[in-house]
Amino acid sequence: MTSVGERAPVRQNWTRCSGCGELNYAKKLARALGVCPECGHHHRLTASQRVAQLTDPDSFEPLSVRVVATDVLGFVDSQAYSDRLAKARATTGLDDAVLCGLGRVGGIPLMMAVMDFRFMGGSLGTAVGELIIRTAEQALEGGLPLLIVSSSGGARMQEGVLALMQMAKISQALAALRDAGLLSVSLVTDPTYGGVAASFATSCDVLVIEKGARMGFAGPRVIEQTIRQRLPEDFQTADFLLAHGQVDAVQHRHDLRGWLKALLSATRPSEATGEVAQAPAQAKTATLVRDPRLLAPVDAWEAVGAARHTSRPTTLDYLDLAFDGFVELHGDRLAADCPSIVAGFARLRDRPVAVIGHQKGHQTTELVSRNFGMPQPEGYRKALRVMRLADRLGIPIVSLVDTPGAYPGKDAEEHGQSIAIAENILGMFELSTPVVTVITGEGGSGGALALAVADRVLMFERAIYSVITPEGCSAILWGDGASAPSAARALGITARRLLELGVVDGVLPEPSHEEAGGAIVMATALGDVVSQTLAELELLERADLVRGRRARFRGFGANGIVVSERGREAVR
């Protein structure tokens, strides 16, 4: 097939789609970025076409170095390796299977390494490894994000173990970017297999895969021959990988540039100062009640009803009303994606933030699809992955809590629910970036605490936070569920009581759920107060944040216990 955008003879002005078999007019197909207008099949692009598709016009500057592979092993199969190299160079116009340089996406500069499958199947050899390394090193030197676009059959066999070493060689460069707090993004295109899939294509901070692309360690044919089983039709496809938690997003080719621009914007420091922006002046007037005496008493059982009301704003509502440019990331990179937790990056008052929150819904369909906001272990692992990424990038974290609790099911137990919650609680004590939690509805047990180990914990006036649901407490201690209202009042789950206990640091007043525009009022208050709180926390040193967060939780319960020192003789 003539590559998209290349001039073809008159007899080749039409090309047959390998997806549906329909004939496509070459110029029309090129204008569609190589996407079949009949079936949506994404034809392969050359490296130069991919650069043109992703970057601002005339913004790409190729790497100012030439790296050429030689035949170190004197490898010969059906033909000499040196002859294969010469043929590939003549056919593609490239020195090897990657095009590297500096580009801009939406005006934001980034270093790019774009693989080209035409050059010996995009195989990873020493020259490819060196070029990607040099691109990563320039990103490190310039403090820029790195984008790697993969399209490869794997490591280049004609270079033997030296090709294998490129997997580790590139990975050490990505480790240096991580240490420097610089973002790396992998764009996986069709096909990506072998050593490339098992190294830099999947070890970047964020993985996005083009719609219709396939990725895996071993190809389907090899797997079927090995295990003697027929694989499902969608095996190793983009949607398969998303469902199994291995990529952050699947994007249509037409949407890739916009998605990448949004991600870069959401993770970039404020353009005005080059540093994290301070809260706007109007945020300082936002209402946050710190004195429990200023809060009107709310009956605990009534608060339970208000916290659970389906009209209450969800995490996605707050992201839409209080934040800008949210880019959602998916999956735990192990097994699955949990829709009960939403996680990603956005901007709040021109400040980049990571946002992690429980998601319920307003209608029955969404409530069911989101498991009523009760996360599986994969949701907690996704949340911790995004929080750790934010920590490496120096981006503050906002968590929005609204869950009856972690999902208590068979699958959840098999997948390590307790371990996942424990890892989150412990992991949040290791974060050295500001963390602010807002309990927006229900704060149920460890399922809530797993997202609420923060420097500041705030809650809305009619939200609740409890060790167990009132119904569960009633069933255990009263012997039935009928005493849930009494249990709610006894548990001390209201905002006023929790402020008295010091469990929360402030309370946001809220309108009743019947009040028109209540969601906008709550979202505005949340945005103002969180922005103000982050501005205060950003004045602290990173080590002080960690110490302060640990000390905050170290003190809980001190008023409810009596401690006496025992003498040595008593100890014996």
Image: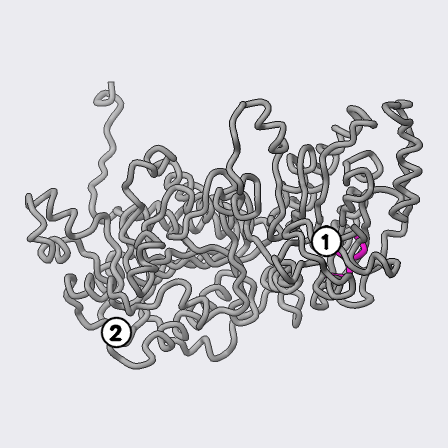
Q: Which residues are magenta?
A: 47-54
Q: Residue at x 92, y 31 (%)?
A: 82
Above-or-below relation of 459 to 226: below
Dot 1 falls on a residue whose secondary structure is strand
Dot 2 falls on a residue whose secondary structure is loop
The residue carrying pointer 2 sits among few (fewer than 14), some (14 to 19) or many (20 or more) residues within 10 Å by Cα, namely some
Q: Nearer the viewer, residue 193 or 440?
A: 193
Instruction: Determine which residue is flagged by label 2.
Output: 513
**Residue at the farthest top position:** 572
Locate residue 208, reporting x and y percent: 60, 51
Locate residue 412, reporting x and y percent: 34, 38
Res 452 seen here: yes
Above-or-below relation of 434 to 561: below
**Residue at the farthest bottom position:** 516
Disc on the earlier residue, 2 or 1: 1
What is the spatial separation of the Cα atoms under label 2 and label 1, in whole angstroms? 57 Å
Locate residue 240, reporting x and y percent: 52, 44
Above-or-below relation of 572 to 350: above
- Between circles 2 and 1, the one closer to the viewer is 1
